Image: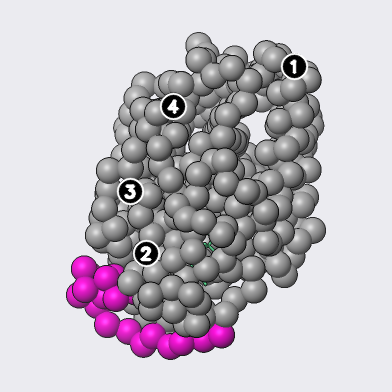
Amino acid sequence: MKRILVTGATGFIGSHTLVELIDRGYSVIGIDNLANSSLDVLNRIKDITGIRPEFREGDIRDKEFLNHIFQMFEVDSVIHFAGYKAVDESVREPMLYYSNNLIATQLLLEAMQKNGIKKLIFSSSCTVYGDSKYVPITEESETCPVNPYGRTKYYIENMLRDLSCSDSHWKILNLRYFNPVGAHPTGLIGEDPLGIPNNLFPFLTQTAIGKRDAMLVFGSDYDTPDGTCIRDYIHVVDLAKGHLAALEALDNIQGINFINLGTGNGSSVLEIVNTFKKVNDVEFIVEMAPRRKGDAAKVWADTTKAKKVLKWKSELTLEDMLRDAWNWQQKNPNGYI
Ligand code: WQD
């Protein structure tokens, strides 16, 4: 039975994509080194879908482990999520990001090549665009990452371009995510960062539930209507469904292609904070703080190509994202067990 190999399977986006793959009847094999996620996710996926996904713990930098997976399971294609994704952590720990994102992906590609698997969906990022002069950002916009995280994604995209040029049998879709947020509407799976959250949404929900004393807004002097940074927040379930659309389009892809996965709408940090309070009827302290290194001022997607190539667009609203994020946090005050 042909399977989809999902790396980073117990992570935030990987777990939500596994739910959609299983619901759509795909046969999957998930792998994860559990460095940034919990095995409990598999129980939750079973609670949602009725099926506990096939899973093996391991690191994609372990060649023996990868070859074992490819020999044990008849893999048709790979969705590669495994990687670290916090912009400011990448500024503090660049080598961690080059090893875990760039080197790990190279080793995965070599193992795929060795086992004759040449269909890949890669979890890329809007951070490859850096502080784009123009918004909305199209796939033809200049790629000029401004932080180590974005540079790892940028270098991987170029490694994939070179691989595609060297061997026309490869079918590769680079999906450039904007800001994935929210949680599954059941509240059974969601975003569960280790330690102090780097990203806005988990910091917001942890402040609202009382785990953090105050919400800090990093920078209020940007060239935006309210002075705070603007991002294109996309519901993680919409993003997961974008991967199903990409999988269905993959066989018709010639070579390599790059596609933005966003909503096409921008929201400022203050808009997010104030709408969160209103939608969820919660109150907490919000303080202005200095800018954060590596942040771009305005980032939101042009979604034309996703509609054309993947026949996909986001459907869930900002309110859905804020409500589902809060529902997950309330049901899991300390995240996964
Ligand atoms: C958003 C805004 C912060 C925390 C993320 C992912 C990255 C990529 C793009 C997929 C910024 C501000 C944050 C806080 C704040 N997605 N903020 N107070 O940096 O856009 O990157 O989306 O690849 O993987 O990390 O997201 O949520 O960290 O920040 O004011 O406590 O919220 O300054 O303007 P970012 P983020």
Q: Earlier in the sequence, mark 1 or mark 3?
A: 1
Q: Measuring 51% from the left and 36% from the top, which residue is drawn there?
A: 259
Task: Measure the C-alpha gap from mark 1 to mark 3.
Answer: 38 Å
Going from N to C along the chain, the mark reached first, 3 or 4, is 3
Q: CA distance from mark 1 to mark 2?
A: 41 Å
Q: Which residue is mark 2?
A: 267
Q: CA distance from mark 2 to mark 4?
A: 26 Å
User: Is the Cβ of the residue at disc 2 closer than 8 Å to that at disc 4?
Assistant: no
C-alpha gap between disc 1 and disc 4: 22 Å
Nearest to viewer (mark 3 / mark 4): 4
Residue toward you, 26 or 156:
156
- Residue 256, percent from left and from top: 62, 26
Q: Which comes before the other along the chain, label 3 or label 2?
A: 3
Residue type at mark 2?
Ser
Please, what secondary structure does the residue beneath circle 3 have?
Answer: loop
Instruction: Give the residue number, with chain letter if any, for mark 4.
Output: 309
Res 184 label: 3
Q: Nearer the viewer, mark 1 or mark 3?
A: 1
Kindly indicate the quadrant of the structure image that contains residue 231.
Answer: bottom left
Dot 2: within a 10 Å radius of its alpha carbon, few (fewer than 14), some, or many (20 or more) residues? Answer: some
Q: Over which residues does the magenta segment extend?
A: 273-290
At x 43%, y 88%, the residue is 287
| Left or right of 277, for residue 166 | right
In the displayed structure, would residue 257 be above or below residue 236? above
Which amino acid lies under the numbered mark 1 shown in the image of this protein? Asp
Instruction: Give the vertical position of 242 relative to 138 (above or below).
Output: above
